[in-house]
Image: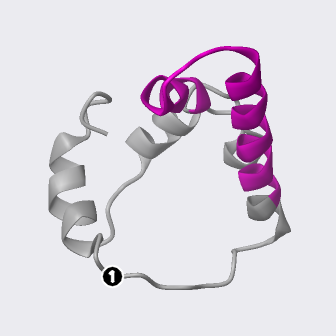
Amino acid sequence: MGDDGYQFIRERLFIPEASTISIAKALNRTVIGSMNELVLYAQRILSAEEISPYDLSFKLNDILMSYIDYDRPREAFGKMKPHQ
């Protein structure tokens, strides 16, 4: 997140909650499908080329995804507004 310009969000929101684990249902089957797509894509990339998980994350964040209106995860995250 730091390399994508979200260092403040990472430090403020994610790191304090990193020790807390919650199990929840997925929003819907489309979310599960998107997660499965990302896993399959990552597996294909890892089997086809020698790449670090760090570099793979940039490739995964650059995939167009139907669930987020054919946007890329990196851009969709940047458009999100925090709940107050």
The residue tagged with tag 1: helix, strand or loop?
A: loop
| Residue type of the residue flagged with mark 1 | Thr
Say left or right for 19 vs 22.
left
The quarter of the picture where the N terminus appears is: top left
Foreground residue among 24 and 56 = 56
Mark 1, residue position:
20
Foreground residue among 78 and 45 = 45
- The reply to whether the magenta stretch includes residue 74 is no
Q: Is residue 40 above or below residue 32?
A: above
Q: How is the image coloured?
A: one colour
Quadrant of res 49: top right
The quarter of the picture where the C terminus appears is: bottom left
Q: Is residue 51 above or below residue 34?
A: above
Q: Position of residue 33 (x, y in %)?
A: 83, 56
Q: What residue sits 80% from the left and 40% below the top?
A: 40
- The reply to whether the magenta stretch includes residue 52 is yes
Q: Position of residue 5 (x, y in %)?
A: 25, 31
Foreground residue among 81 and 60 = 60
Say left or right for 40 vs 56.
right
Q: What residue sits 68% from the left and 27% below the top?
A: 46
Foreground residue among 65 and 16 = 16
Magenta residues span 33-60
